Image (spheres, rainbow, N blue to C red):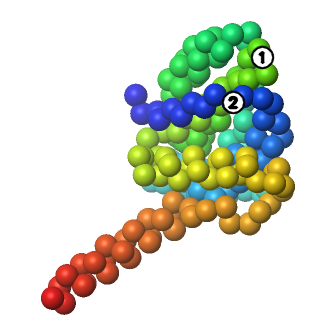
Amino acid sequence: MYNVPLAFRVIGNPGLDRLQASIDRLVEQHEVLRIRFDDSGPVTMQAPADATVLRPRLQILDNVQVFDDALRIAERVAHERFDLGKECPFRAIYVPSGNDEGLLLLVAHHIAIDGRSEQLIVDDLFDGLDSRDHGRSQGNIGMSFLQFADAQRDKAEKSTFDHEKR
């Protein structure tokens, strides 16, 4: 299995528009979440802002009465394969359940996320949800993965250079 699932219990009504806005900002911030791969290598998908085909949309699944049912649905959805030639390597799913709670499931293909980037993505998602403006643009909400990788490379090169000077 090449999927990396991240599941979060959501207590209270998250506001689906607000949740979608946070996911939109997340995907905008992290280029790797909107890349399609084909036989010639990675191809960044770019389209007008209103082109929803290229951006992962929050999928709202049927309301379930018991949270354990939401977990079973999430487990099934987390195992669905990505077609990396046709879709982005990231999905966001919300399963509402009774008692004003639900389950937010993020699923990424391992080609787009690893242990280090996972925390960046989760932090940026929840920073967006916690923002006071509830979905309006707040500028740069964090470091993109490419910026992070560049900073790590620069840090490693500096460390190597400093070590060689001794």
For residue 159, above or below residue 118: below
Which numbered disc covers residue 10?
A: 2
Q: Secondary structure at mark 1?
A: loop
Question: Split into 4 quadrants, where in the image is the C terminus?
Answer: bottom left
Q: Residue at x 67, y 52 (%)?
A: 127
Q: CA distance from mark 2 to mark 1?
A: 11 Å
In screen coordinates, is 61 left or right of 41? Answer: right
Tell me residue 162's x, y (percent). 24, 85
Q: Which residue is mark 1?
A: 99
Which residue shows up at 44% across the image and 72% down it? 151
Residue at disc 2, secondary structure: strand
Q: Position of residue 43 (x, y in %)?
A: 54, 55
Label 1 environment density (alpha carbons within 10 Å; few <14, some 14–19, many ≥20): few
Is residue 70 shown left or right of residue 49?
Answer: left
Using the rendered image of the protein, determine whether residue 54 is visible from the camera's viewpoint: no
Is 68 or 5 nearer to us in this picture? 68
> Mark 1 or mark 2, which is nearer the start of the sequence?
2
Q: Residue at x 53, y 53 (%)?
A: 120
